[in-house]
Image (cartoon, helix red, strand yellow):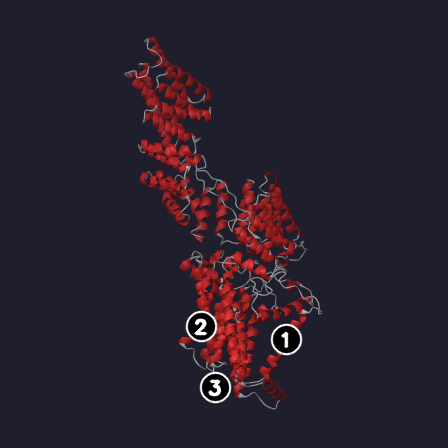
């Protein structure tokens, strides 16, 4: 057995790179979305142990919706990709190309066991370029095939060293084989079939038995004429150890899936639910279909489910001839290889074992699988096919007159396959290119029409997506998922009536509940989303909330462990202000999934509505323990700490807001709240920096602009506040508190009474009943020495706010002043430029106090920021976790955007009251001066 030279390695690697380099420009498509983009097990925040508890798609194995595909080692390599490049698709594709090159080198090493140096290289070259492998290599999820194949081939090579030079058993290679079989199985289930390949090699190649020899030996043993030879006993011992070890692996695997097969529907595999003989005829016909894909990979398709291959419903169907020819060819090859001992027979039997045994788990012959045909499962069987082709060329090339022709054919075959592979890679560039290429091959698969629609939907091209979804319903009128997609798209187009009609059609196609029969075994769990989506649609109408609740309860009655139904119902109950029931719904969901950070977050939102902030904070913390980067929990828990007014919470609130802005660096609200925290802590420089950052990210951010202006005003930088207020009023001309603050600065610091007057008049134009605006306008009249007008203005203000004592006192002061001036013979209005007397200076002080009293009572630090919905990001999102929908994209309409406003802190309220008390004290002193006490 010749070793593989470094030149051969370079040749194979170069050929693989030449065929697949363009795959590096492809994105994530089809199943990659669920396995990579939506799989939380790739994230560093997810414990590594979850890889061994969840299936390939990140769903807990215990859940009924789990696909039961247990491939933790494959997911671990995805996690490594994520660690180095997160979701950069190129790195995932690059590793797949490298793994394919490794498989090709190992396959060449295996071929050397039963082919000569030249034709083993031919087999490896053909394997390297075969177009059937594009799904396994260019599709990222195909890595399961690549990794499993590496361990499968390594296990086989290890086993071939289990016989010593003296024909004794070498146990170390056998132990290594068992370990490698376990690794292959943890990459993909078909890895366990290498044990069968080892058994075939041991019996028919290593020991050189033929089927007639085995039958004759068995007959003699049964008749008592002879016992088993020592060599046979040694072989049996090796095989028994290997098989028992494998059975243990199988038992563990069955325990992992909890002895449950995944739930598939007739849409995934129509033949699986068909009656006899349709089921048997169709499944057997699929074997020649797969063989034809290996022989002629000209029309490849990423999805062969639904109506791609019509059912074979009769013995008279001409397609049965293809099945007959396939089995005839297979039997002839098996007969030839099992009855002869020469090297050609050994090569054929090993090729057949590589074709047949790894394909058995995907054949549907022993248990149903979730697909009709899948090109990637032909990755290992194609090894046997390539061996057969190379062996055939070897036989032809030994005939002198056909030698040159055979090599020309090999060259043409390798070239055409390489070109086809290279071109096929471009189909995997995006989901849109992939599914449109599939529709060129097959227009009878509703799933393909659906998936092109999804690709367009992801581009927000809803009108065109709708055309494809509607075509899917025409191709497969009973496809529940297609009608759900139509409904969702109509909703996105704001056509609620049409959306509801489509959801109702989907609901009518659901199987009826049969007493005593488990519902989920008769329908795909994600089809139950029709109840959720329909309820989410109609609950937008306040008069139909009870009807929506009935739909949620109907889904729960069909499947009591339907977590999403509890989540969505919790949202609805929150909207209906049934807080206790909403809390109970989330608690029930948590019983089903306590490791779900989103559920703890939703429960915290309910606690806030129930006025239980301490419990809310505990549940936010639960969410963050499970997912320390949970953005909404970070934001809302920090906001809750900020609202508490407790300085001891401020450092942690600050840390959480900082973490939030790391996750959402473009969200101005995070920086705004950091600024508010800094203002609470009297860290004015930091507050200014954060407010400026928020404003730079969101032009016209009204709360940030107002509070920045207020910060300047409080830190005696009133002049700096004016351009900020101008920007605020340019974006929000109706901002009353901004106008009040600007008017105050103009009057007290710029001595611009006309500008201040314009601000206050503008307020009263928008809101004639605004007491503060009216009162401040009175102060302007007082400043202008127009006491009669100030008196009338204060009388009108008192009529608006008869219980405001400070307005009454100010009116009394003005009247006293008017009486004093009348008795002294002074005019009640001042000419422009008149000299201010000492008494007038006192009156100026009165004016300032009047403003201060009014301002202190109305405008605390950050009043606008907390009273007018400033924290615009504060969104409560229930049911953050989406369900995997029909054709991997059925989304749920389950977000609820509720604004939560922030009240004044205890410190702020005390500061305001202190300010008011000091101002009133000063007012009393000035009143005594004016009255001559």
Is 511 situated left or right of 565 in this image?
right
The residue pinned by badge 3 equals 167
Front-most of residues 682 and 82? 82
- Marks 2 and 3 sit apart, C-alpha to C-alpha, by 34 Å
Spot occupied by residue 66 in the image (x, y as percentages of width and height) = 55, 59
Q: Secondary structure at mark 2?
A: helix
Extreme bottom residue here?
225
Spot occupied by residue 217 in the image (x, y as percentages of width and height) = 59, 87
* Closer to viewer: mark 2 or mark 1: 2
Q: Image quarter for residue 67?
A: bottom right
Residue 856 shows up from this direction: no
Q: Secondary structure at mark 3?
A: loop
Residue 14 shows up from this direction: yes
Spot occupied by residue 561 in the image (x, y as percentages of width and height) = 58, 54
- Identified at 48% across, 71% down, the residue is 128
Is 318 situated left or right of 350 in this image?
right
Q: Residues within 10 Å of mark 1 (few under 14, many from 20)?
A: some
The residue pinned by badge 1 equals 327
The residue pinned by badge 2 equals 12
Q: Is residue 504 above or below residue 235?
A: above
Q: Is residue 155 above or below residue 839?
A: below
Q: Which mark is residue 337?
A: none
Is 99 situated left or right of 254 in this image?
left
Of the numbered discs 2 and 1, the one sitting upstream in the chain is 2
Q: Image quarter for residue 704?
A: top left
């Amino acid at each position: 057995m010749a070793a593989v030279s470094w030149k051969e390695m370079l040749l194979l690697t170069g050929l693989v790179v030449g065929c697949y380099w363009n795959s590096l420009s492809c994105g994530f498509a089809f199943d990659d979305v669920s396995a990579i983009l939506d799989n939380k097990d790739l994230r560093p925040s997810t414990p590594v142990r979850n890889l061994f508890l969840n299936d390939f798609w990140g769903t807990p194995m215990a859940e009924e919706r789990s696909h039961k595909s247990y491939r933790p080692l494959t997911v671990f390599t995805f996690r490594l990709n994520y660690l180095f490049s997160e979701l950069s698709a190129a790195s995932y594709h690059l590793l797949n190309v490298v793994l394919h090159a490794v498989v090709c080198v190992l396959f060449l090493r295996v071929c050397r066991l039963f082919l000569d140096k030249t034709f083993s290289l031919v087999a490896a070259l053909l394997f390297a370029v075969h177009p059937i492998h594009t799904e396994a290599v260019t599709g990222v999820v195909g890595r399961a095939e690549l990794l499993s194949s590496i361990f499968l081939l390594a296990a086989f090579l290890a086993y071939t060293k289990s016989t010593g030079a003296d024909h004794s058993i070498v146990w170390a290679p056998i132990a290594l084989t068992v370990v490698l079989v376990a690794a292959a199985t943890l990459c993909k289930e078909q890895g366990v079939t290498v044990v069968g390949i080892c058994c075939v090699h041991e019996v028919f190649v290593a020991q050189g038995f033929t089927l007639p020899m085995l039958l004759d030996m068995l007959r003699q043993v049964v008749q008592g004429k002879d016992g088993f030879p020592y060599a046979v006993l040694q072989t049996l011992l090796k095989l028994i150890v290997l098989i028992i070890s494998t059975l243990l692996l199988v038992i563990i695997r069955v325990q992992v899936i909890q002895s449950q097969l995944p739930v598939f529907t007739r849409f995934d595999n129509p033949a699986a639910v068909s009656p006899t003989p349709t089921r048997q005829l169709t499944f057997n016909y699929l074997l020649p279909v797969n063989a034809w894909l290996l022989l002629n990979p000209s029309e490849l398709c990423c999805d062969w489910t639904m109506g791609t291959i019509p059912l074979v419903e009769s013995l008279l169907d001409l397609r049965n001839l293809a099945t007959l020819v396939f089995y005839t060819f297979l039997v002839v090859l098996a007969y030839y290889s099992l009855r002869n001992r020469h090297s050609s027979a050994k090569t054929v039997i090993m090729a057949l074992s590589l074709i047949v045994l790894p394909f058995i788990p995907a054949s549907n012959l022993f248990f149903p699988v979730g697909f009709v045909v899948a090109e990637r499962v032909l990755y290992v069987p194609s090894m046997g096919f390539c061996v057969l082709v190379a062996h055939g060329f070897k036989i032809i090339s030994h005939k002198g007159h056909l030698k040159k022709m055979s090599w020309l054919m090999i060259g043409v075959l390798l070239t055409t396959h390489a070109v086809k592979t290279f071109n096929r890679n471009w189909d995997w560039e995006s989901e849109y290119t992939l599914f449109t290429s599939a529709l060129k091959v097959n227009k009878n698969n509703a799933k393909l029409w659906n998936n092109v629609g999804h690709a367009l939907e992801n581009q927000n091209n809803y009108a065109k997506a709708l055309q494809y979804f509607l075509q899917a319903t025409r191709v497969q009128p009973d496809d529940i998922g297609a009608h759900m997609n139509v409904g969702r798209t109509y909703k996105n187009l704001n056509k609620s009536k049409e959306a509801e009609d489509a959801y109702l059609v989907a609901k009518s196609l659901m199987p009826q509940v049969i007493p005593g029969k488990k519902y989920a075994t008769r329908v795909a769990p994600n089809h139950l989303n029709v109840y959720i989506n329909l309820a989410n649609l109609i609950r937008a109408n306040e008069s139909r909330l009870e009807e929506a609740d009935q739909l949620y309860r109907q889904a729960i009655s069909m499947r009591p462990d339907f977590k999403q139904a509890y989540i969505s119902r919790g949202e609805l109950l929150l909207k209906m202000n049934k807080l206790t029931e909403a809390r109970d719904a989330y608690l029930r969901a948590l019983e089903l999934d306590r490791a779900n950070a989103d559920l703890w977050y939703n429960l915290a939102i309910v606690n806030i509505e129930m006025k239980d902030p301490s419990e809310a904070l505990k549940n936010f913390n639960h969410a963050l323990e499970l997912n320390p980067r949970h953005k909404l929990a970070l934001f809302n828990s920090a906001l809750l700490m900020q609202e508490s007014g407790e300085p001891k919470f401020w450092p942690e609130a600050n840390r959480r807001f900082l973490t939030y802005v790391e996750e959402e660096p473009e969200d101005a609200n995070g920086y705004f709240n950091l600024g508010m925290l800094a203002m609470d802590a009297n860290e004015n420089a930091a507050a200014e920096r954060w407010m400026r950052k928020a404003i730079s990210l969101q032009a016209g951010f009204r709360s940030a602009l107002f509070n920045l202006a207020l910060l300047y005003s409080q830190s005696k930088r009133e002049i700096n506040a004016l351009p900020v207020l101008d920007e605020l009023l340019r974006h929000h001309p109706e901002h009353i508190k901004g106008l009040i603050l600007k008017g105050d600065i103009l009057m007290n610091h710029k001595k611009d009474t006309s500008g201040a007057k314009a601000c206050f008049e503008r307020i009263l134009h928008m809101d004639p009943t605004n007491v503060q605006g009216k009162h401040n306008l009175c102060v302007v009249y007082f400043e202008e020495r127009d006491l009669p007008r100030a008196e009338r203005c204060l009388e009108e203000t008192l009529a608006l706010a008869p219980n405001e004592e400070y307005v009454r006192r100010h009116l009394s002061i003005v009247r006293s002043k008017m009486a004093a001036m009348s008795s002294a013979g002074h005019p009640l209005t001042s000419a422009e430029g008149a000299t201010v007397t000492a008494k007038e200076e006192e009156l100026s002080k009165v004016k300032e106090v009047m403003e201060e009293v009014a301002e202190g009572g109305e405008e605390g630090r950050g009043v606008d920021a907390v009273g007018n919905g400033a924290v615009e990001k504060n969104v409560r999102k229930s049911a953050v976790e989406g369900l995997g929908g029909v054709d991997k994209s059925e989304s749920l309409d389950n977000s609820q955007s509720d604004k939560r406003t922030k009240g004044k802190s205890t410190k702020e309220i005390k500061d305001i009251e202190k300010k008011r008390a000091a101002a009133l004290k000063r007012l009393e002193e000035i009143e005594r001066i004016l009255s001559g006490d």
